[in-house]
Image: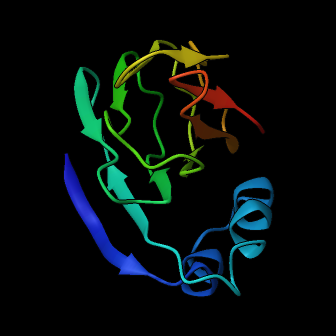
Amino acid sequence: MSNISGAIRGEELADAITSASVASMLASYQTKNLVITAVSADTGTTVSVNSADVLVINNGDTILALTVVLPAAPADGKTVAIATRSIVTGLTLSGGTILGALTAGTANGFAQYCFSSVADSWVRVG
């Protein structure tokens, strides 16, 4: 796994990605001051979200297995979006209880999760 870009603004990343749905999702974040991290991940890799608000899995080839670790102790209301450029056939989300966790990713797809302290869980909201 290699970090192909540091924290950049949504507008810069949206300009760099050709995928219409991923670029559209990122465009909605352009006016916000969010941390966007793009990584290239190999099959069998574990990627930690850490402080990112948007994690872009920036691969062109299908990923057979990928684990994404969400923050284990986030603030109430913290949101994280995960976008994929390629197909992820086996996706595992970890980092506490995750309601509505994806088990696979489509090419140019994304999902968004919000942490609820009441539910003590990440809840899929998009």
**Of residues 15 and 26, the one drawn nearer to the viewer in this rendering:** 26
How many numbered marks, from 0 up?
A: 0
What residue lies at 69% left-to-right and 29% top-to-bottom?
124
What residue lies at 68% left-to-right and 67% top-to-bottom?
26
What residue lies at 28% left-to-right and 38% top-to-bottom?
47
Question: Is 103 situated left or right of 4 in this image?
Answer: right
Query: On the rendered image, what quadrant is the N terminus found in?
Result: top left
Q: Quadrant of residue 105?
A: top right
Query: On the rendered image, what quadrant is the C terminus found in?
Result: top right
Question: Is 81 situated left or right of 58 in this image?
Answer: right
Residue 69 horizontal/vertical position (percent): 33, 31
Instruction: Examine the rendered structure and indicate whether residue 84 appears above or below residue 95.
Output: below
Residue 115 horizontal/vertical position (percent): 56, 38
**Of residues 125 and 82, the one drawn nearer to the viewer in this rendering:** 125
Residue 37 horizontal/vertical position (percent): 39, 63
Q: Quadrant of residue 95?
A: top left
The chosen color scheme is: rainbow
What residue lies at 55% left-to-right and 83% top-to-bottom?
33
Q: Residue furthest front?
A: 118
**Of residues 122 and 108, the one drawn nearer to the viewer in this rendering:** 122
Residue 64 horizontal/vertical position (percent): 40, 16
